Image (cartoon, helix red, strand yellow):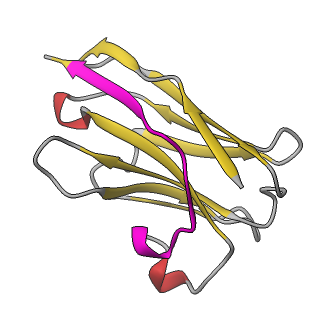
């Protein structure tokens, strides 16, 4: 599976931004699709994920209520709608995919097999 992320940019605090991730190669329909981010000087952290089975979604506490993850299986895309952005959301955002797995590992980057190249999101105060 190849993943291509897009949609990053420079916005002001309180603005919205929508990231997209297009999958190619093997179908993405049987993959959990997630978003992670890395800020300067910090470890890569989990943001959100949507399961291939049932479409359940999970979010990091820091983005819950502001970000929404969704997927379009027909188009093999996953999106991250980011509202009420804060300066601390500034990071490189990566989309990732994994071929299923137990729920307890769904927030762990090490359990994702495929990664996109990342897209920069910068939120100014």
Is 110 inside the magenta-drawn segment? yes
Q: Judge from the rendering whether residue 89 lies leftward or rightward of residue 66; answer left or right.
A: left
Image position of 67 with respect to 123: above or below: below
| Part of the protein shown in magenta | 109-123
Q: Is residue 21 visible?
A: yes
| Quadrant the N terminus occupies | bottom right
Which residue is found at the position 21% from the left and 42% from the top?
Answer: 39
Q: What count of labels does the image hold?
A: 0
Image position of 50 with respect to 116: above or below: below
Residue in front for this viewpoint, 59 or 75: 75
Splitting the image into 4 quarters, where does residue 51 fall? bottom right
Residue in front for this viewpoint, 62 or 98: 98
Which residue is found at the position 45% from the left and 45% from the top?
Answer: 94
| Quadrant the C terminus occupies | top left
Residue in front for this viewpoint, 123 or 1: 1
Which residue is found at the position 61% from the left and 37% from the top?
Answer: 4
Q: Position of residue 116 (x, y in %)?
A: 54, 45
Is 71 inside the magenta-drawn segment? no
Image position of 112 with respect to 87: above or below: below
Q: Position of residue 104 (x, y in %)?
A: 46, 85
Q: Judge from the rendering whether residue 94 lies leftward or rightward of residue 57; answer left or right.
A: left
Q: Position of residue 86 (x, y in %)?
A: 22, 29
Splitting the image into 4 quarters, where does residue 75 fall? top right
Q: Judge from the rendering whether residue 23 lies leftward or rightward of residue 69; answer left or right.
A: right
Q: Position of residue 95 (x, y in %)?
A: 52, 48
Q: Is residue 84 visible?
A: no
Which residue is found at the position 30% from the left and 58% from the top?
Answer: 45
Image position of 13 with respect to 86: above or below: above
């Amino acid at each position: 599976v190849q993943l291509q992320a897009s949609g990053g940019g420079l916005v002001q605090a309180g603005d919205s931004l929508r990231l997209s991730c297009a999958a190619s190669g093997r179908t993405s329909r049987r993959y959990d699709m997630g978003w992670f981010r890395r800020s300067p000087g910090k470890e890569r952290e989990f943001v959100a994920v949507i399961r291939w089975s049932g479409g359940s979604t999970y979010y990091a506490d820091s983005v819950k209520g502001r970000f929404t993850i969704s997927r379009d299986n027909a188009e093999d895309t996953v999106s991250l709608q980011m509202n009420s952005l804060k300066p601390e959301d500034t990071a490189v955002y990566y989309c990732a995919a994994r071929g299923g797995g137990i729920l307890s590992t769904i927030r762990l980057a090490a359990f994702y097999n495929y990664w996109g190249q990342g897209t920069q999101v910068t939120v100014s105060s």
